[in-house]
Image (tube, grey):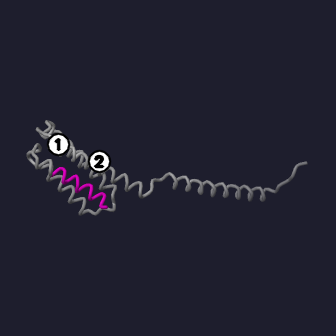
Amino acid sequence: MALYIPPARRRRRLIAAAAVALLAGLFGGVLIGRSTAPSVADRVTAVRSDAREAAAGLRVIALHDEAGALSNQDGGGADLTLRQTRTALVRAFDQAPWLGNSQRTKVLADLDRLAATGDKSSKEFGTAADALATEIEATFNPS
């Protein structure tokens, strides 16, 4: 014995089932999306970590100058590190909207002044590189 279901009732059931499936899919998608998205704290931690790595490169320059390492004698190693530091800092500032333009301008200007130093094997250059590393860390992690 076959049950006859009128077409209007079938259409209403189909529309209701589709609406329930759509809402369930949207709700599930939002839950999955929110649980896998990085939090603000995760992004802040990542930017601070990038800034610490940039500062670490400057500290390596300072250590090489203290040790009299040959890598800074011609300025090549120091120049490469300064270029990499600038690239890393620009990227970090772009990802750190909580830092103002004045902070960005000051740190990058200090980096440019350090890069313009003539004798990159001097003790003063190493001291300035270490001071800039401290400034970078203080700018990105003011605690």
Asked which quadrant contains residue 68, the reply is: top left
Residue placed at 22% from the left, 47% from the top? 59
69 shown above or below 25 = above
Among numbered discs 1 and 2, the one appearing first in the sequence: 2
Q: Are marks 1 and 2 in contact (CB under 8 Å)?
A: no
Magenta-drawn segment: 128-143
The answer to whether residue 86 is left or right of residue 35 is left
Tell me if residue 130 is in the magenta stretch.
Answer: yes
Say few, some or many: other residues with alpha carbon within 10 Å of mark 2 (under 14 / 14 to 19 / 20 or more): some
Along the line of sight, the residue nearer the viewer: 38 or 64: 64
Say what amino acid the circle numbered 1 marks.
Ala
- Magenta span: predominant SS is helix
Outermost residue, right side: 1
- Give the camera-side residue of 18 and 96: 96
Q: Residue at x 66, y 58 (%)?
A: 19
Of helix, strand and loop, which one carries label 2?
helix
In this rendering, position of residue 133 left or right of residue 21: left
User: Is 108 one of the magenta-colored residues?
Assistant: no
**Residue 53, numbered circle:** 2
Image quadrant where one finds the C terminus: bottom left
Residue at 13% x, 36% y is 70
On the picture, is 97 further left or further right than 71?
Answer: right
- The spot of residue 128 in percent (x, y) is 15, 52
Closer-to-camera residue (56/9): 56
Give the residue pinned by disc 1.
78
Which residue is found at the position 42% from the left and 58% from the top? 40
Answer above or below: position of 38 versus 99: above
Q: How many marks?
A: 2
> Marks 1/2: CA distance?
15 Å
